[in-house]
């Protein structure tokens, strides 16, 4: 974390060097007129000590040419450790107690939670129109971190009317994070019929998935398969027919995705990876940090650049 000598974007994660953004961003920067803007990764271990998060945030806040950062994996832990260091906290970040984007505007150091937007845009890319209203399926979110909370808020928006899942279930292997999820989502729990289940083992996640009706959605939002090896399900997981399976990671061993693909044809599953989520997650942050609108033709152009890179 040396002082930046030119406007710089940061990526706070666990294994940032392995991310495609390191190859993609320089090409995006050129397309967006940010040619002289580099991207730098800051790697921290899972659930790092609070003082480590505060050291990173203090550096970004006080270094004039450090423009902002995307935060992954550490969204909740970083927010809880550094909440008092932010001059502005956007409504989603306040409600979810998480941060995925750090930026500076009008002399203020700002915390944003972009996941309800980026996850929603990603879901709309592969979930058919009126899917929930037409079929009455449910949603299981594996993991009780920031992505699951964000998706829950997305499903709970009043604009969907009766086109909402019959139930949203969050499964997590630790009880403190599950209790935190319940607390943050209590305002919308009734609207999405929220259920939280303690599932300390993959076999227990399998049992929840096995009870789903057809046309449901199962999401791996645990980080397993990217930030750590493995899967939140076993090879014996049994999906219901005509369901959607979303691995929100696009890199790593992606064991969860491969387990679903093994029964894709037999169950008529739609198996989605995390590439579109990657695109929306990053473009939302870049747009906020550099105050550049990224939508329509520009979004399509950046998506094509990313694929080619």
Image (cartoon, rainbow, N blue to C red):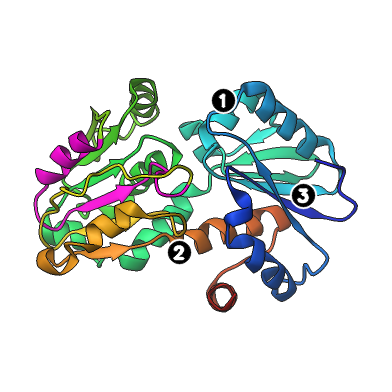
Q: Who's the residue at 74% across and 45% down the image?
A: 104
Q: Who's the residue at 58% across and 61% down the image?
A: 283
**Mark 3 burial class by Cα count in 10 Å: few <14, some 14-19, many 20+:** many
**Mark 2 burial class by Cα count in 10 Å: few <14, some 14-19, many 20+:** some
Helix or strand or loop: what does disc 3 sit on? strand
Q: Earlier in the sequence, mark 3 or mark 1?
A: 3
Q: Earlier in the sequence, mark 1 or mark 2?
A: 1
What's the magenta region?
202-226
Which corner quadrant holds the N terminus?
top right
The CA span between labels 3 and 2 is: 25 Å
The answer to whether marks 3 and 1 mark residues whose Cβ atoms lie closer than 8 Å is no
Image quarter for residue 32?
A: bottom right
The CA span between labels 3 and 1 is: 22 Å
In this view, the residue in front, 55 or 102, is 55
- x then y, percent, for residue 25: 67, 65
Closest to the camera, between mark 3 and mark 2, is: 2
Q: Which mark is residue 80?
A: 1
**Mark 1 burial class by Cα count in 10 Å: few <14, some 14-19, many 20+:** some
Q: Is residue 211 magenta?
A: yes
Q: Which mark is residue 275?
A: 2
Which corner quadrant holds the C terminus?
bottom right
User: Can residue 98 be seen here?
Assistant: no
Image quarter for residue 186?
A: top left
User: Can residue 138 be seen here?
Assistant: yes
Image quarter for residue 247?
A: bottom left
Instruction: Tell me the residue that label 3 is attached to.
Output: 67
The answer to whether marks 3 and 2 mark residues whose Cβ atoms lie closer than 8 Å is no
Q: Is residue 169 left or right of residue 83?
A: left
């Amino acid at each position: 974390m040396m002082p930046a000598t030119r406007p710089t974007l940061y990526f706070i994660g666990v294994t940032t060097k392995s991310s495609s953004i390191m190859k993609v961003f320089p090409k995006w920067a050129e397309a967006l007129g940010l040619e002289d803007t580099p991207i730098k990764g800051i790697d921290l271990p899972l659930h790092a000590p609070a003082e480590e998060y505060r050291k990173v945030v203090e550096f970004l806040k006080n270094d004039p040419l450090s423009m902002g950062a995307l935060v992954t994996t550490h969204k909740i832990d970083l927010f809880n450790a550094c909440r008092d260091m932010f001059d502005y906290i956007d409504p989603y970040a306040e409600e979810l107690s998480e941060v995925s984007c750090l930026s500076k505007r009008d002399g203020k150091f700002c915390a944003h939670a972009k996941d309800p937007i980026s996850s929603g845009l990603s879901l709309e890319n592969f979930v058919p129109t009126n899917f929930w209203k037409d079929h009455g399926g449910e949603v299981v979110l594996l993991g009780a971190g920031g992505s699951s909370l964000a998706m829950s808020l997305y499903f709970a928006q009043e604009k969907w009317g009766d086109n909402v899942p019959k139930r949203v279930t969050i499964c997590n292997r630790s009880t403190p994070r599950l209790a935190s999820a319940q607390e943050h989502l209590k305002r919308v729990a009734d609207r999405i019929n929220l259920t939280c289940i303690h599932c300390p083992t993959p076999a227990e996640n399998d049992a929840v998935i096995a009870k789903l009706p057809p046309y449901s959605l199962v999401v791996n939002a645990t980080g397993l398969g990217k930030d750590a090896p493995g899967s939140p399900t076993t090879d014996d997981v049994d999906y219901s027919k005509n369901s959607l399976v979303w691995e929100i990671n696009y890199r790593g061993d992606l064991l969860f995705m491969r387990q679903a693909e093994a029964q894709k044809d037999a169950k008529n599953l739609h198996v989605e990876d995390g590439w579109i989520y990657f695109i929306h997650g990053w473009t939302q942050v870049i747009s906020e940090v550099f105050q550049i609108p990224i939508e329509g033709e520009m979004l399509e152009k950046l998506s094509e650049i990313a694929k080619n890179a």
